[in-house]
Amino acid sequence: MPKHDKITQKEIDYILRVAGKVPLAYMAEFLGCSIWTVCNHANKHGISTRVPKSIMTKYWPEFCPERWLN
């Protein structure tokens, strides 16, 4: 169960700082809330959470599909 579903200003600042660099699942885990909470907030405010494939395979291979790693 997520810790909370409301996003504080400090958490908003974190999302803005790392969006596009850190996977959504990691952001949600770090913030202690659900992936949907982070995703909905980002979508509502026009923040892209898509991390480029090159960054994902280099820094976050545990979040990559197997076909990216070959």
Image (tube, helix red, strand yellow):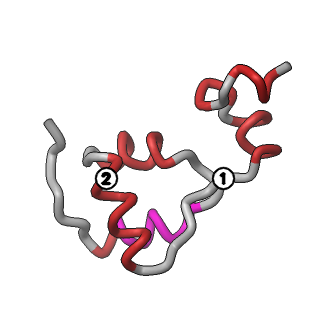
**Mark 2: which amino acid?**
Trp
Image check: 66 left or right of 48?
right
Mark 2 or 1, nearer chain start? 2
Residue 51's disc number: 1
Query: Residue 59: within the magenta?
Result: no
Mark 2 highlights which residue? Answer: 36
Q: Quadrant of residue 3?
A: top left
List x then y, in percent, for residue 9.
30, 75
Query: Residue 16: within the magenta?
Result: yes
Image check: 40 left or right of 62?
left
Q: Nearer the viewer, residue 29 or 53?
A: 53
Q: Residue at x 27, y 46 (%)?
A: 34
List x then y, in percent, for residue 30.
38, 44
Looking at the rendering, in which quadrant would you find the C terminus? top right
**Mark 1: which amino acid?**
Val
User: Dot 1 surroundings within 10 Å: few (below 14), some, or many (20 or more)?
Assistant: some
Q: Quadrant of residue 10?
A: bottom left
List x then y, in percent, for residue 24.
48, 48
Q: Magenta stretch: give its range.
A: 11-19
